[in-house]
Image (cartoon, grey):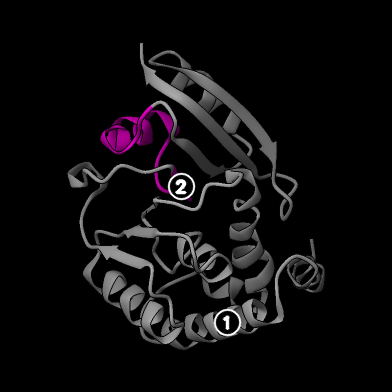
Amino acid sequence: MTEKEARTWAETRFSADVIDRLDCFAAIVVEQSALQNLVAPSTLESLWNRHIVDSLQLLPLAGEVRGPWIDIGTGAGFPGLAIAVACPECEMVLVEPRRLRADYLRSAAIRLGLGRVEVIQDKIERVSRKAAVISARAVAPIERLLASAGQCADSGTTWLLPKGKTAPEEVAQARRRWHGMFHVEQSLTDPESRIVIASGVRPR
């Protein structure tokens, strides 16, 4: 998917107001990347493809669920803050252990007018909030994520986990310790990327 195709994909699915806020969000990422290493510098010219739409494609996979949604290791704001912009009625909890990143996320949420975003500066292992959806992008192997955030989930929680081409192997490894439904979806933005969707997850 090219940068133009990514933006067109978003424009056909979201309101003009959401697109304007996403443009504002992109500008914040570029601005703040000059102060701290938010994203790889090589991706700043392709934010819509590499980061924004790569995040937004998770929203329809969550179905009608609008929260609580926990995003683990949000970093620069992907996918959690991007999803919060596109779905401002969603209760979004961004879990980010690094202080500078957490401060940045709070500031960005205020600048974007997102009143239902909460930032928790901590490791997910110490968070006890229950979630309808849990997402994590490039944080840890699936088996480790399920163990680290299991206290935030119940049988109705949907896990949305963007992964690379090793996703099937990670799912196979996770199934050794976890029951549940695991489905691997092709990413829209990168032919080598996948999205693991899991539900009904519980320890064996």
Q: Which residue is mark 1?
A: 21
Q: Where residue 32 sits: x, y (%)? A: 42, 84
Q: Which residue is mark 2?
A: 135
Which is nearer the eye, 51 or 150?
150
Q: Where residue 59 sits: x, y (%)? A: 60, 53
Left or right: 155 in relation to 85: left
Which is nearer the eye, 104 or 43?
104
Question: Which residue lies at the image location 37% right of the left edge and 20% below the top edge?
Answer: 202
Q: Where residue 38 sits: x, y (%)? A: 43, 72
> Amino acid under label 1?
Arg
Question: Which residue lies at the image location 33% right of the left edge and 77% below the top edge?
Answer: 104
Q: Where residue 101 sits: x, y (%)? A: 31, 71
Q: Are marks 2 and 1 in contact (CB under 8 Å)?
A: no
- Is residue 11 in the magenta section? no
Which is nearer the eye, 101 or 22?
22
Q: Is residue 57 above or below residue 47?
A: above
Q: Which residues are magenta?
A: 133-154
> Amino acid under label 2?
Ser
Give the quadrant of residue 91: bottom left
